[in-house]
Amino acid sequence: METVKEIRISHSETTEECIAERHLWIAVVTRALEDWRNGTLRQRRDAQKFLFEDTQDFARVCAGAGLDPASLRNRLTKIGRKISMEGAWSHHMAA
């Protein structure tokens, strides 16, 4: 049988792991936002695809960060314009 001290340590470690994991996912979202706004053309395109077109990975990352994907996308649409993907640059190019 676990003692109260062991339960507290276990709970504390679990809480710290959850917080660390949430911070990691927030960092992923933050990086995507930074790339979308200030990255190279390729980084902006990749970030835009992730932020506005991806369904599965974006939803998972948002869930891990404690964010609602639809709400985040709505906010992003309001605060910034999407990068134009029209014309010759819309084709995928090898790195």
Image: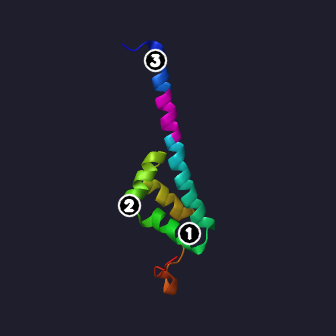
Q: Residues within 10 Å of mark 2 (few under 14, many from 20)?
A: few
Q: Is residue 72 above or below residue 43?
A: above
Q: What whole-number distance in Å separates the C-alpha atoms at marks 1 and 2?
A: 19 Å
Tell me the SS state at disc 3. Answer: helix
Q: How far apart in space, not on screen, are marks 3 and 2 (Cα)? A: 41 Å
Residue indicated by mark 1: 43
Percent of width and height locating residue 69: 43, 54
Residue 14 lies in the magenta-colored region:
yes
Crowd tier of the residue under label 3, counting other residues whose Cα lies within 10 Å: few below 14, some 14–19, many 20 or above: few
Residue 38 position in % (x across, y down): 63, 66
Residue that mark 2 sits on: 55
- Residue 41 at x, y percent in the picture: 58, 74
Q: Give the camera-side residue of 30 and 95.
A: 95
Mark 3 and mark 1: Cα distance apart in space: 46 Å
Q: Nearer the viewer, mark 3 or mark 2?
A: 3
Q: Position of residue 40 (x, y in %)?
A: 61, 71
Question: What secondary structure is the stretch in magenta mostly built from?
Answer: helix
Image depth: mark 3 or mark 1 in front: 3
Report the side of 93 relative to 40 (left or right).
left
Residue drawn at x 52%, y 83% is 89
Q: Circle 2 — which element?
A: loop
**Closer to the camera in the image, 90 or 9:** 9
- Name the outermost residue toward the bottom: 88
Q: Which residue is mark 3?
A: 6
Q: Are marks 3 and 2 in contact (CB under 8 Å)?
A: no
Q: Which residues are magenta?
A: 13-20
Point 46% across, 79% down: residue: 92
Type of residue at label 3? Glu
SS at mark 1 in the image: helix
Mark 1 is surrounded, within 10 Å at the Cα level, by few (under 14), some (14 to 19) or many (20 or more) other residues, namely some
